[in-house]
Amino acid sequence: MIDNSSIESLKSSIDIVDVVGSFVELKKAGANYKANCPFHGEKTPSFVVSPSKQIYHCFGCGVGGDSIKFVMEMEKLSYPEAIEKLASMHNFSLTYTKGSSDYSDAKRVLEAIGQWYVKNLNQNTAAKQYLLDRGISQSSIERFEIGYVPSGQEVMQFLTSALLPLPKAAEAGIIAQSENGQGYYARLVERITFPIYSASASIVGFGGRTITNHPAKYINSPQTKLFNKSRLLYGYHLAKESIYKNKKIIICEGYLDVVMFHQAGFTEAVAGMGTALTTEHLPMLRKGDPKVILAYDGDKAGVSAALKAAQMLSTAGFDGGVVLFPDGQDPADLIAKGQSEKVATLLRDPKPLIPFVIEKICEGYDLTDPRAKEAAFTEVKQYLEGMSQIIKEAYIPLASTVLGVAPAMFGKQTNLAQRQERFSQRRDDVAQLGILKTLLEKPELIDTVLNVVDVSMFAQYAGLFSALLVGEKDHPQLVGLSVDDTFQVMNEDELKDVLRNFLIKHYDTKLKSVVSDTAMPFAKKSFIIRKIKTDIIPKLKRGELVTFDEKLL
Ligand code: ZN
């Protein structure tokens, strides 16, 4: 078991903004951060992270909790697994009570086998020669810890002789259990190996490239607790410093490209794990606020990958551009042939993301055909709708020129009417929710409030009010309210003012409903009307609060 005190110190050393921010794209909103909820599909962010309370809450689907809960839900992990995951994300060493298994064993296996792979490379002339032929220098081989994995039998022998527990090696993705469950086999054999590190520079897996014309050119570690390929970037731990310093990150297509870019002095280069860039990469890319340069092959696959990535990045508000290497000349080859200067020239002049997207979308259509032109227009318009008004308007002239349509066709769609409607609907709720929010933070004011109102006066929020009174702290709506920036915590005077206005409105409405109530006995009716008209309302208007009277219900 994980030692409790070490869980506590882990908890106190992590920040929910970091934790959630490494899974989803967070945007600052007042004192909080906002995002599109990762737990339910949505287009407008209703997911809020509160750094002061160290909790998250979704106003859309009601989920909420602390960092650990978030990781549990996000990664479908048990409590101890989530703790281990958080610890590994933050390079935090947990202590374990005696006799329990240590998750960091998997990491130890990765480190040991990585060193062994490196040693093997020097003994395998074919593998070493392959790298040298590709123009990779000895110092790059060392810097990137490139290695070689021999036969499966040798892998198993190594693990046994190094006393590395096989279940841990399986957990680390090095070996897998054979189908009959009788034994293990090595997942990566006879390949050049590239260790893959997390952003915090701990080893999480390997990529392997065949040199024997195996149909799968590259194989990566399988998804493990440590290795999540959609959130890793190859070379990031080596590029990090330059990325921060030069405010630039170069994303290329393959591991060898990364190695060659670094070798040629472009030390901001990273690559995806053989998969497309996804929104899961955005939090990592955002770190250090760099310009993102996509350095892709100019072939069909490269262009389409660049288009998708550029579209995603620009919509997410990234600055940057695209460099396509012409005629299938891949950058690694250019550098190997001593043409680093050519690469540098291309990198200095990237096509900015938004114009790149607009032009590539249009190139995909025959604009002389009206129907195709209409489809291109719709696609470009949709793309621009995803941008802020200012950015959108800045690029309408370019889009209309490329498409050959009038700028006016892009229109000025404001959602002002919609927004106003939503606001007025909410305005009536502001008083009640503001009162509840204040009581959440300042329970000592509860008597002041209960003295003048009854729970039932809160109509649709009566349930919430009751939950608050009985101290149901984890009621999802109460948690939501506590992180909702729309409502301010009031001081006592402000609270009394709001209460007074709330009561004036309440008794006004009450008066009208009593007057028109034909079923109410005459004596009661006249009592209530007189009480409200001659006593309550005048007092409230004078600035006094009036004690709640049950007879008025
Ligand atoms: Zn949600």
Image (cartoon, helix red, strand yellow):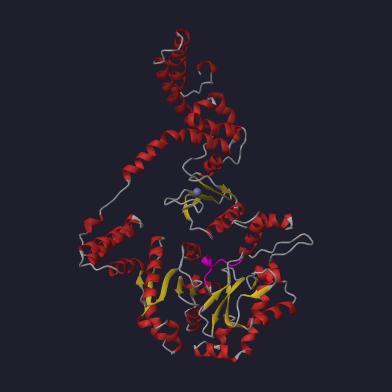
Q: Position of residue 112 (x, y in %)?
A: 68, 77
Residue 527 in sight = yes
Identify which residue, 419 or 254, lies in the foreground.
Answer: 254
For the N terminus, the image quarter is bottom right
User: What's drawn in magenta, residue-wise?
Assistant: 226-233
- Direction top: furthest residue: 523
Q: Position of residue 357 (x, y in %)?
A: 33, 67
**In the rendered view, does 362 fall on the left or right side of 137?**
left
Identify which residue, 300 or 398, lies in the foreground.
Answer: 300
Q: Is residue 230 magenta?
A: yes
Residue 31 in sight = no
Q: Is residue 548 placed above or below 439 in the rendered structure?
A: above
- The residue at 57%/90% (across/down) is 126
Q: Is residue 390 placed above or below 237 in the rendered structure?
A: above
Q: Main secondary structure of the magenta part?
A: loop
Q: Is residue 413 placed above or below 99 in the rendered structure?
A: above
**In the rendered view, does 468 fall on the left or right side of 252?**
right
- Direction right: furthest residue: 98
**In the rendered view, does 111 fall on the left or right side of 44?**
right
Displayed quadrant of residue 349: bottom left
- The residue at 45%/21% (across/down) is 507
Q: Is residue 270 placed above or below 524 in the rendered structure?
A: below
